[in-house]
Every structure is written in structure tokens, then in C-alpha cells.
Amino acid sequence: MEHFYNDLLETDENITFLLDKNGITNYKGFLLKFKDRYGQSPKAVRRKNRAL
């Protein structure tokens, strides 16, 4: 999950591409775990980080 998170913040790649790149095949399950861990969706994390 950390690799995906880092890729999310460091690249402009599509989120689906990043999931595939990191070997994540259960998108829905991963996104639920991501939201539990970080408190928001990958899209929201990326948007918030760009605003900083």
C-alpha cells in the first residue's frame, strides 16, 4: 500500500494504472482498505496533496 501511496503522490498516472502497476487486482477491496487507512479515497488524497 505504501508503494501505491507514494506513486499516487509522486506521479500523475491514472489511479487504475497505478493499481495495476502495484499488482493490485481487487480494486474495490484495496480502495476500501486505503480509505480505512488514510481516511479518504486515493483521488481525494491526490487532490489534497496537490493543493499544498
Image: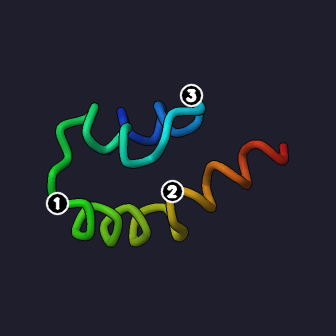
Corner quadrant of residue 31: bottom left
Which residue is most to the right? 52
Classify 44 as above or below 19.
Answer: below
Q: Could you say whether the residue bearing mark 2 is in a helix, strand or loop?
A: helix
Horizontal arrangement in the rendering, residue 22 relative to residue 8 (left or right): left
* Residue at (56, 28) in percent of width and height: 11
Q: How far apart are marks 3 and 1 (CA)?
A: 22 Å
Residue under label 1, please give it. Answer: 26
Assess whether mark 1 and mark 3 are in contact (beta carbons under 8 angstroms): no
Q: Earlier in the sequence, mark 2 or mark 3?
A: 3
Say whether disc 2 or disc 1 marks the residue closer to the N-terminus: 1
Q: Nearer the viewer, residue 38 or 20?
A: 20
Name the element at disc 3: loop
Q: Which residue is drawn at 36% across and 33% down?
A: 3
For label 1, count other residues whose C-alpha is less than 10 Å away and answer few (under 14), some (14-19) or many (20+): few
Residue 36 position within the rendered picture, expressed as x and y whole percent measured from the top left: 39, 72
Q: How far apart are marks 2 and 1 (CA)?
A: 15 Å
The disc at residue 42 is: 2
Amino acid type, label 2: Pro
Percent of width and height locating residue 30: 26, 61
Amino acid beneath label 1: Asn
Element assignment for label 1: loop
Q: Nearer the viewer, residue 14 or 29?
A: 14
Q: Where is residue 46 drawn, in percent x and y? A: 63, 49
Q: Disc 3 designates what residue? A: 11
Kindly identify which numbered label has been placed on residue 1: none
Apparent side of residue 20 relative to residue 8 in the rendered image (left or right) = left
Q: Which of marks 3 and 1 is nearer the N terminus?
A: 3
Left or right: 34 in relation to 22: right
